[in-house]
Each structure stands twice: as structure tokens, then as C-alpha cells.
Image (spheres, helix red, strand yellow):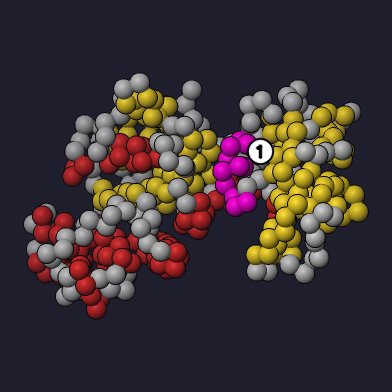
């Protein structure tokens, strides 16, 4: 295993700047997820770490060794892709042991390692089968087993669950997390799926337009977004935002005065997550437009001072379209942002300095 140090990595494709001076450290044994929309730069960054792309600027250090000029095979990494890349003409055993055979590892050691990772991933009974006889979930397990069998210092995974259906993704998430916790392999995992990121990661690095805008544990990214973008990108439904006007030492939002607004010169933006509001006698009042039952909860969409506003409430509360609903934030859940820059003004910890200029 090894730590990873990404320093000032930038990448340009023609006139397009895909990455802007990205900095990120991944500790030995840590599981870091690069989370972002398509085009955010996450796969480009992963490919640079892997040696499949060359950075325009900056350096990558793995286990204390600078690897910028090393080919992928000499970096001590293994990769798992979304298309599995399982060889159809080989048995599961031979697929898992392929990398070891290429390294000319003795047959007895190949046998030991293949059976160990097959047991970890619960595919021992599949070792004599060919990939055409396997389901999508089984093929993905084989791909992960093959990567782990070579005992890499670093495991790189690019959208490995995206081709699976919802139930298989749920099953594989839990299995993958357990296997990697046991192996303690340093891992960088790329996804656009925030549920995957929240459930798997020790730390999430949120990427936007070629920059890391926040790198922190999942709960911190969710409850303490570093920017308005993170608050709006993480969560389904996303964080609500409303303009605020300063009034004395507080700020007025949709007609309601909040006395705990930060003392900053910047114009303010109010933020609150939909599940962090409760019905109250006074607070933010708006007209209910749509009510959507969601099992134990209901998603209520409101018109609040001309802005679309969402709240998640218990299903036993009677709410009807057309009526007025007044809501109060749960204690400590309001987030304030600089209305111009989008930077959080109630941030509890600093995001990793990974954005570049």
C-alpha cells in the first residue's frame, strides 16, 4: 500500500483546460472518491494518476516516488473500469490470475492469491466458469478480484458500478466497501453517483470545472458544504437557497428575520436542506404547490417569496396543495454563503486547498 500526493496537476486538451492546478493527498489505506458531473475532470485526473494521460503541469507521487515518467505497469497500481474488461476465453480463475501470470509469479502463489480474493468476493464457486456464463454483477466481482490479486499499492476505479442495475449496485457497494476495508488498499474511485460516493468514501473530493472545490468526509460535505455549488450538487433534493437582506445584526429572508447571520461585508445567501425544516408557528411561510408521497416521507414543493422551495416532511402530516405552510429551520442547520462568490460563511473546517487558481 502507499499514499498518493497530487501536486499542482493541470491538463489542457487543445484550447480546453480540463484541470486547473489540482492538489490532493490520499493517505495510505484511505478510500477517496472523486465525485462530479460529466466534464468535471475526475476521470482525467484518475487517468493521470494511472499514467494513461500525461499532465500538462504538476506531479504525482505514489509511495514517496515521483511517477510522472513511469508507465502504468511500473506505478504499483491496478485499475477497474466500468466495462469490466473480463477475458471471455478464460475461466474466472485464469482471469483473476492473469496479472500474476504476466508477472511470472509461481503457480502455487497464484493459486493462493486467486483463492483468497475469490473468497473475499464470494465467487469461489465460479472459478471454473467462463465469463459468458456470468451475470453483470459476477463479472464485476471478477474484475475487482483480478485487480486485488496483484496486491497493488494503489487501486484506481473508474465508474465500476455504472453498468449494473439498481439492486446490483446496492449489493456491490456493500461488498466492495467490506473488501476494501479488509484489504486496506489505497483507493481512488471515480463516480458521478453521489449515493455511491456518500456510502463508500472515507473522504469525498467534489470536482467542478476542473477543480476540487471541497475534499472532506461525506457527512461534512453534506452538512457543511464549502460552496453553494457543493450544497446544490450534493443531496436529492438539493439544498434550498434564498436571497437575504441585512437588517441590523441579522438578515431578513422571505420576510422572516434571522438574528444569527454572519457578520461579514458580503451580500448574503441563505441555505437550508429540505429535511432540516419543521412546521412552526412562525418562520418561512409559502404556498404549497405539489405534494409527492415518498414512502415514510413526503416531498413538498412550495412557492416561497417567488422562489421554488422544497421540504421533506413526515408522511403523517396532512399537507395539501394551495394551503400556506410555515417552516422553521432545525437548530444549527442554516448555512450562509457569500452571494457573489458562493463561498460558505458558516464553514466549520477548511476544504483541502485543492482548487488551484
Image height of 186 relative to 183, above or below = above
The residue segment tinted magenta is: 227-237
Residue 230 forms part of the magenta stretch:
yes
Is the residue marked by circle 1 packed among few (<14), some (14-19), or many (20+) residues within 10 Å?
A: some
Task: Tell me: 270 left or right of 185.
Answer: right
Quadrant of the image occupied by residue 303: top right
Residue at 60 percent of width and 52 percent of height: 236
Quadrant of the image occupied by residue 98: bottom left
- The x, y position of residue 318, in whole percent, is 81, 65
Image height of 354 relative to 167, above or below = above
Say which element carries label 1.
loop
Task: Tell me: 312 left or right of 125.
Answer: right
Residue 102 forms part of the magenta stretch:
no
**Residue 81 appears in the rendering:** yes
- The x, y position of residue 4, in whole percent, is 36, 41
**Front residue of 59 and 170:** 170
Mark 1 — residue? 347
Amino acid at each position: 500500500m502507499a499514499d498518493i500526493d497530487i501536486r499542482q496537476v493541470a491538463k489542457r486538451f487543445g484550447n480546453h483546460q480540463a484541470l486547473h492546478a489540482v492538489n490532493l493527498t490520499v493517505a495510505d489505506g484511505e478510500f477517496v472518491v472523486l465525485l462530479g458531473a460529466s466534464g468535471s475532470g475526475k476521470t482525467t485526473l484518475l487517468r493521470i494518476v494511472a499514467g494513461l494521460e500525461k499532465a500538462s503541469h504538476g506531479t504525482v507521487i505514489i509511495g514517496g516516488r515521483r511517477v510522472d515518467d513511469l508507465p502504468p505497469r511500473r506505478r504499483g497500481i491496478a485499475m477497474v473500469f466500468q466495462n469490466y474488461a473480463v477475458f471471455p476465453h478464460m475461466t474466472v480463475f485464469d482471469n483473476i490470475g492473469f496479472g500474476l501470470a504476466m508477472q511470472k509469479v509461481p503457480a502455487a502463489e497464484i493459486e493462493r492469491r486467486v483463492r483468497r480474493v475469490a473468497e473475499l468476493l464470494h465467487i469461489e464457486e465460479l472459478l471454473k466458469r467462463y465469463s459468458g456464463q456470468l451475470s453483470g454483477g459476477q463479472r464485476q466481482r471478477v474484475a475487482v478480484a483480478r485487480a486485488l490479486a496483484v496486491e497493488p499499492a494503489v487501486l484506481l476505479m473508474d465508474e465500476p458500478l455504472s453498468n449494473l442495475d439498481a439492486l446490483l449496485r446496492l449489493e456491490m457497494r456493500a461488498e466492495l466497501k467490506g473488501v476494501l476495508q479488509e484489504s486496506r488498499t489505497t483507493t481512488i474511485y471515480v463516480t458521478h453517483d453521489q449515493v455511491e460516493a456518500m456510502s463508500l468514501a472515507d473522504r469525498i473530493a467534489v470536482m467542478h470545472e476542473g477543480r476540487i472545490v471541497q475534499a472532506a468526509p461525506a457527512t461534512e460535505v453534506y452538512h457543511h458544504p464549502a460552496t453553494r455549488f457543493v450544497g446544490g450538487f450534493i443531496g436529492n433534493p438539493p439544498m434550498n437557497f434564498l436571497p437575504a437582506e441585512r437588517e441590523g445584526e441579522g438578515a431578513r429572508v422571505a420576510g422572516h428575520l434571522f438574528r444569527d447571520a454572519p457578520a461579514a461585508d458580503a451580500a448574503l445567501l441563505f441555505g437550508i436542506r429540505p429535511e432540516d425544516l419543521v412546521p412552526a408557528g412562525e418562520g418561512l411561510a409559502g404556498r404549497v404547490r405539489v405534494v409527492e408521497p415518498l414512502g415514510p416521507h413526503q416531498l413538498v414543493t412550495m412557492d416561497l417569496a417567488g422562489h421554488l422551495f422544497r421540504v421533506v416532511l413526515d408522511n403523517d402530516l396532512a399537507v395539501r396543495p394551495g394551503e400556506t405552510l410555515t417552516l422553521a429551520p432545525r437548530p444549527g442547520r442554516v448555512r450562509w454563503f457569500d452571494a457573489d462568490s458562493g463561498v460558505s460563511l458558516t464553514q466549520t473546517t477548511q476544504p483541502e486547498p485543492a482548487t488551484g487558481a
